[in-house]
Amino acid sequence: METVVQNIEFLLLIAAIVAMVVNRLRMPYIVGLTLAGIGLAFSPVPIELPLTRDLVFYILLPPLIFEAAFHIPWKGLRKDLVLIMAFATIGVVFSAAVTAVGMHQWAGWGWPAALCFGTLIAATDPVSVISTFKEAGAHGRLRLLLESESVLNDGTAAVAFTIALAVTAGGDAAGPLEALNMLLLTVFGGVICGAVLAGFVMMLAGRTDDHLVEITFTTIAAWGSFLLAEHYHVSGIIACMTAGVILGNYGDLGSWNDVGRKAVAAFWEYAAFVSNSLIFILIGIYQAKQNIWGVIVPASIAVGLVTLGRAAAIYPVALMFRKSRWKVKMKHQHVLFWGGLRGALALALAMGLPEDMPGREAVITVTFSVVAFSVFVQATTMGALLRRFREIPALKKAGRR
């Protein structure tokens, strides 16, 4: 335990230094963190903090999701919910299909590895997306669409990944109706868990004016909703998002005063900063340990297919709504396409694959390659793309997050 605490303290020191440096260099924060992690991997300093699925899912992901959801306006989310759900369902299926078929045909992977990779990489990563758009300074409908989609498409990807694992293990694949039932259960089960915890917290918070107690209650809501949902095998990410949206939009209704709300917002901003910092430093450390050159051909094919799959997830779906009130401007479609970053979520799923699955190591290494492309290419060019479409000021200075 002492070693773990020392590692976390050291990584936070590195994160703070990186934050100051990237502000001067106008470099995206997650890029600076990843580079710092790669540097640490080659340093004599031992970092004994493994990047595991449990660490990402149960410790580092909830504060990022909750903090982002806390600031999502319900009116805006409700207005575009149909469009967001279309991106998060139809879009994920399109993306997974393009990637899986392509890896089987062009990279020569067997169907088990291709299907698992296609589904785990189909969903955009909430950690990467939220961090990148906050740092770029994007606001309004565009940011709402991309951040909300990155959270909600977890439900579809989770169902698709479960089906792919069943096929890989030699089990019976779910039919269309069963898959739909699984999706509805995953999504709405998560919503119910998040709403229950948020309602419970609002009821308790209304009985105190102590902002420290109010912060404690929101902490219970964030991790509690996530753990409750995962316990019942529904989406913890969607549960955490639901709790955040409810408390962020309706927490003032007798629950806390202005002082309490400001204290809660400040706490979660810092919690998200810490989680984001640890995730991307660890990604950098483990990125350096991957033998990417040994799989350079399938990795290059995968990057191309994932990019093509993202295009299949955005443009056809947006075309379906071109004559409706959910119409998406073409320039926003381009940003949605390029903003489909992959990160810790995909890595966590990949490292959670069965040990005896054929091609498991190749899937993990190629997933790291796709994440590297997201961090070093997509994240670094997102600010320029947003400025090109005048979504942020021309001289917007990069922030630490």
Image (cartoon, rainbow, N blue to C red):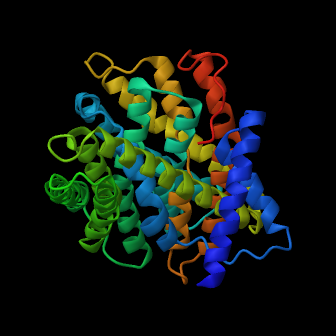
- Location of the N terminus by quadrant is bottom right
Q: Is residue 14 left or right of residue 241?
A: right
Q: In the image, residue 262 lies at what x, y percent?
A: 37, 41
Identify which residue is drawn at 51% across, 51% down: 270
Closer-to-camera residue (43/2): 2
Q: How many marks?
A: 0
Residue 307, above or below 65:
above
Q: If the image is split into quadrants, where does the C terminus sit?
A: top right
Instruction: Farthest residue to the front: give it.
Output: 210
- The x and y percentages for residue 293 are 81, 61
Left or right of residue 359: residue 146: left
Q: What residue lies at 34% left-to-right and 53% top-to-bottom?
A: 156
- Asked whether 186 or 218 is in front, the reply is 218
Do we see residue 101 in this rendering? no
Rendered residue at 34%/64% (across/down): 223
The residue under the point 62% across, 78% down is 4
- Which x, y percent locates residue 85? 29, 40
| 339 left or right of 398 in image | left
